[in-house]
Amino acid sequence: MSQSSTQKQIPLTERGHRVFDVVRKFGKGAQEIEATLTSTTGEFLRFGNNELGQSQFTKGRTLSVRLASEKKQARTTTGRLEESFIQKAVEKAVAQLKTAPEDPDYLPMLGHQKYRTINRYHERTVQESAETKAGHVGYAIELARKNNLLASGILGTSVDEVFMINTAGLEADYKGTGGYFSLTMDADNGNQTGYANSTFADISELDAKQVSETTLERARLNKAQSEITPGKFDVVIDPNAWSEMLFFFIVSASTGFSPDFGVRQYREGRSYLSGRMDEKILGDNVTLVDDVYHPLQTGPAFDGEGYPKSNLTLVENGLLKGLASSRISAHRYDGVNPTGHELPLPNPLGEAPTNLVIQGKGGTKTTDELVGELDKGLLLTRLWYIREVEPRTKTLTGMTRDGTFLVENGKIKRPVKNLRFNQSLLELFNNIDGFTEPVRNTSFTGTTMLQPGILARDFNFTSVSPF
Amino acid sequence: MNSTKSLGEELSRVCLETATRENATYADFRLVNTISEVVGIINENPASEELNDLGAGMRVLYKDSGWGFADTDEVNPENIRDTTGKALALARGATKIGSKVSFVKEPVHVEDWVSPKKKDPLEVSTDTKYGLLQDATGRMKEEGIVARRGQIFSTRIEKYFANSEGSKIFQDLTQTGASLIVAAKGPSGIQRRSIQQYVLGGYELLDELDLPGQAPTLTKEALALTQAEGCPEGKSDVILSADQVGLQVHESCGHPIELDRVLGYEANFAGRSFLTPDQLGKLQYGSKHVNIVMDATLTHGHGLGTFAYDDEGVQAQRKYAVKNGKFVGYLMSRGTASHVGENRSNGCMRADTYKLPIIRMTNVSLEPGDWDYNELIEDTRDGILMDTNYGWSIDQKRYNFQFNCEKGYRIKNGSLGEMIRGPGYSGITPEFWNACDAVGNQKSWVLWGTPNCGKGQPQQVMGTGHGAAPSRFRNIRTFGAS
């Protein structure tokens, strides 16, 4: 068995045209119609306690319809593509359209667009047999068993497809594969533990053996931890350790988890960046770009209304230089051009960069090389449960887990108990002395980020856990 | 007959016959139809969406040692047969890396259950909802306010469950929720005030919440917070508002009593737990004032963790997790109960739509104590009142936590004093709950809804309930978050 289906598959674009004909038939009361068809299939081998206990195959499609008339909009989404259910969904949207308030920012739907070609679909990921994937998991479990450890984690592969079409002549489509292998080995109720993970678009990129061996090596090192007094430490953060923390660059809790790097939020004063354009917010050696075309990035080359995505420099050499924009912002504000970062409409939240690439200046090194440059400090292999404490300084709190190591004179000396930190993200990015090559990682919300590991000064730890 | 139920009956036969023919030890089938609607406004911009999601999930146990699960949104007999085959193939593969599963017994149940509601929220027009939100957010327009946001959530979940033992259960659940947020900008940066509540019930919630009536107070408080002093750093007696106590229960009791994480099945993502089986019946988790129940029954209230049967067909139950401060029980499933010597699950397997069921919180609630809210304040000589959660974080075994709230007040000699912004507190779970010396009574007890608890890989989102009253904790570490 593999993730591919034995049933004959109709291409999503062909199915999308058929569905759009049905949507138009029942949406005659609307002046403009947009339909977005998405399809996701996934196969996940999930294991824990050295057992393959939660193997899952999952398949889902949705049709989302946006109708608009006289500056009013309504959206309905359905998981059923039979005509009677499409009719029901469209008629519901037509009814909502009649009573919806006017959206002062409404713009007519976008016409035909040209997109840069991106190839993110890898047949090998789809065709890889469950047996081969179970072999990767089996190797990890066997390695754990031999070392009196328990393996837990997941090996997942997926195919995502999107087709967007509207009555103004727009057609956009995307098909991509992805996957990840996340592994923990532990013993003594997690008092001894190690972790590693890897993501891929093409499963042949996955070196499952290396993930297993890195996890084992860290688990072997991380036992009988000693307690250290919290305070400021220089740190090396492994590139795979901190996607959740970096996600807070672009999202704030202060207005209910809304994006920060968009023109609308910036101009309305809702963003922590408001009023800081051209100010130095990060170190000279940090550049932040949004680049959907980067070979390691994921997702389509168009935004939530089908506008082509541009590459965007957000922070250049530490200076705030750009913001994600959209047609709405270009219409609302003088001197603003759309960059293709709109969310699906109607969207009162504002724009969001969704393909972040964090670039460090001054050459790239491996995590081991960064550790070699650390006189005294801590190596952090995983950060966990990050939340915003204060939005303007982007002070975040969270914990270390699965391996925190004291480093002296460039060598790992001993493992230490897990620590809580309260650290400003902006301050941290002003204190970086070295970078690794960025790796692809996915935050807990699904946003793909290319993130480096770092060597940084004065990371602020505030308390210690009992383990 | 309800169309989800009749389709579920037809398709479950296909699934269960296929699994039985292929010699599965056990199989269950769920058809879930979810209709959810969100109506919202941020500043002047409206947005609404209705989502209808129908699909089926099939779980198969093979040779007592391999589990396989598959789901699909193509709900026709041919595809259900094919998808059951995928679950069987995964289960056969898992037997090679599995161990013998001990699956405790559950009586066969055949029942239909509809959750109570006075006003179906999906029958209330979006026009009415927009009107209410425009009224509420309109009352927040003031100099210094940078964001006004209101949302109303309406959900109906129809589920049909059948298993190879003969259970056939249909449930029809209605949930309603609402939130209102206002953000002000001033000398101390952006300060937020908000309210939110989610229940198993109907649109009557919106009448109870009175969003337009609350909007001016929230706005005034957000503006006042931009001028307020920060929270002192050090140690202090702390009184937490009921909603904050509810989240504290969720994070520091609800998660560590999930038996799957205790047994190591969640070690890679959600983590493990400090509440290991050797502590059961022995550990003094909290003071004698701390009684925490796991209660999915309607008698407990209209919570997001209220139902008649869980997603593996086990009847809703009420059990203690903590009794007079002592740790006494776990959230369990049929596959895990025997690991702690139980011969019946207490019904905590729940799934996000038709995905794989995993152990989740139901309603995990702190039972009310005997203190009037006013008595709590009057009895506190020097302390801090903290109200409405802003941020939360806890380690993977649920020991070391840190929370910060939207607003606070100093308490001096039994009276509320000046307002303080961003009050925060931190601690170690058993030390914290053992420092609890007073719990508010039934008058101030509320069953709060938490709609967005994440767990599992791929991640699932689940609604849980947490009953709580304002409570006092002695000598707690405090800090200023902003």
Image (spheres, rainbow, N blue to C red):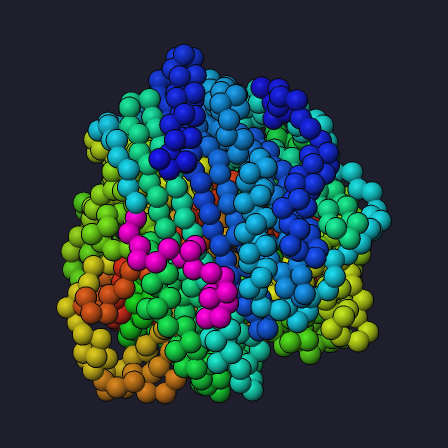
User: Looking at the figure, which quarter contains the N terminus of chain A?
Assistant: top right
Q: Nearer the viewer, residue B332 or B16?
A: B16
- A16 versus A391 height, above or below: above
**Residues in magenta, as a range:** B115-132
Occupied quadrant, residue B104: top left
Left or right of B75, for residue A113 = right
Do we see residue B247 in this rendering? no
Where is residue B228? Give x, y as percent.
45, 85
| Residue B453 among magenta residues | no
Do we see residue B13 in this rendering? yes
Occupied quadrant, residue A191: top left
Q: Nearer the viewer, residue A238 or A339?
A: A339
Q: Nearer the viewer, residue B9 or B264?
A: B9
Q: Residue at x 22, y 33 (%)?
A: B344
Q: Residue at x 33, y 83 (%)?
A: B410
Where is residue A439? Give x, y as percent.
69, 46
Where is residue B15? Give x, y as percent.
43, 22
Q: Residue at x 58, y 43 (%)?
A: A87
